[in-house]
Amino acid sequence: MQTIRKEGVNGLYKGATPPLVGWMCMDSLMLGSLTQYRRLINEHVVQPRRAAQPASVWAGREAEKVKLPVVGHGVAGMLAGWTVSFIAAPVEHVKARLQVQYSRSRNERLYTGPIDCTRKIFRQHHLRGLWHGLGSTLLFRTFFFFWWGSYDLFTQALQKHTSLSTPAVNFWAGGLSAQVFWITSYPSDVVKQRIMTDELGPGRKFPRWRDAATAVYREKGFKGYWRGFVPCFLRAFPANAMALVAFEGVMRTLNRPEL
């Protein structure tokens, strides 16, 4: 309500341009690298180990033998998260700096938009300034392990215990696994935002991740790590459920085998 009162409805979309453009690249890289990491882990780690086991272990379970285990899905997700972090860090950095300006009057704002923000950061702090917060971004996306590991678990459970269609399974598994991800990762996202909106020059308050995490706890206690969680949690289900329906639908159209 404060945002609408001060900025109007447009204020709710403050800083939306960077993710609108950046997420096209980010999601393409994440899902593409995820698919490749799944394949590489299965071909070079899982299958050689299973081939070394006695044939009796997999007797009657040939279909299961070729599938990637849950841990493999989790590791592939984590690696994909690290990979996409190198694109995500500058996009989220610019978005974060634009969003914290809404409480200031227009004359006091440092940036007029994403291009102006990017230009000024680069001019004053070069590439290192744009990638400010990369370490916290890598840590945050380490929790992709839980997203893609739980996605496989939910998919298997829904296929086994329900008669839902394949797109419906993708929808529910995608939405539920996204919520697992945010439950496990949200505190690290709060710390990441604090780091990304910190001063870039000599007045920097949080030179280390631990400094920002300590500051959040000192100000709000344990609840500080969960500030803003509810709207994020509510958004996670429909947004990611539809994304996974689209992704899996494309993969089926391309006739890519499931792992």
Image (cartoon, rainbow, N blue to C red):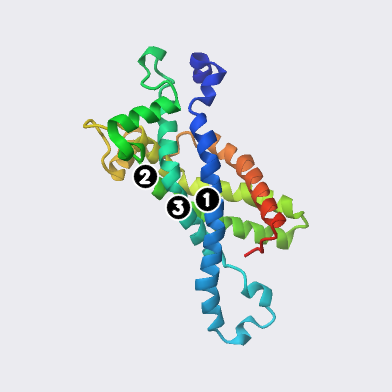
Q: Is label 1 in contact with label 2 (beta carbons under 8 Å)?
A: no
Mark 3 Cα shell of 10 Å, populated few (<14), some (14-19), many (≥20): some
Q: Is label 1 in contact with label 3 (beta carbons under 8 Å)?
A: yes
Identify the mark at residue 83; answer none if there is no mark.
3
Question: Residue 125 falls in which quadrant of the image?
Answer: top left
Q: Which residue sits at x=57%, y=67%?
A: 69
Q: Which residue sits at x=54%, y=60%?
A: 36
* Depth order, front residue of 175/247: 247
User: Could you give the CA–CA distance between mark 1 and mark 2, rounded to whole angstroms?
Assistant: 16 Å
Q: Residue type at mark 1?
A: Met
Q: Could you tell which of marks 1 and 3 lies nearer the N-terminus?
A: 1
Number of numbered discs overlaid on the protein picture? 3
Question: Residue 153 falls in which quadrant of the image?
Answer: bottom right
Residue 57 visible, this orientation:
yes
Q: Is residue 137 left or right of residue 162?
A: left
Q: Circle 2 sits on which residue?
A: 134
Q: Position of residue 235 (x, y in %)?
A: 58, 37
Mark 2 Cα shell of 10 Å, populated few (<14), some (14-19), many (≥20): many
Q: Could you tell which of marks 2 and 3 lies nearer the N-terminus?
A: 3
Identify the mark at residue 30; answer none if there is no mark.
1
User: Could you give the CA–CA distance between mark 2 and mark 3, rounded to whole angstroms?
Assistant: 11 Å
- Extreme left residue here? 202
Q: Could you tell which of marks 1 and 2 lies nearer the N-terminus?
A: 1
Please say if 155 is above or below 61. Answer: above
Q: Residue type at mark 2?
A: Leu
Q: Position of residue 56 (x, y in %)?
A: 62, 86
Q: Which residue sits at x=63%, y=49%?
A: 174
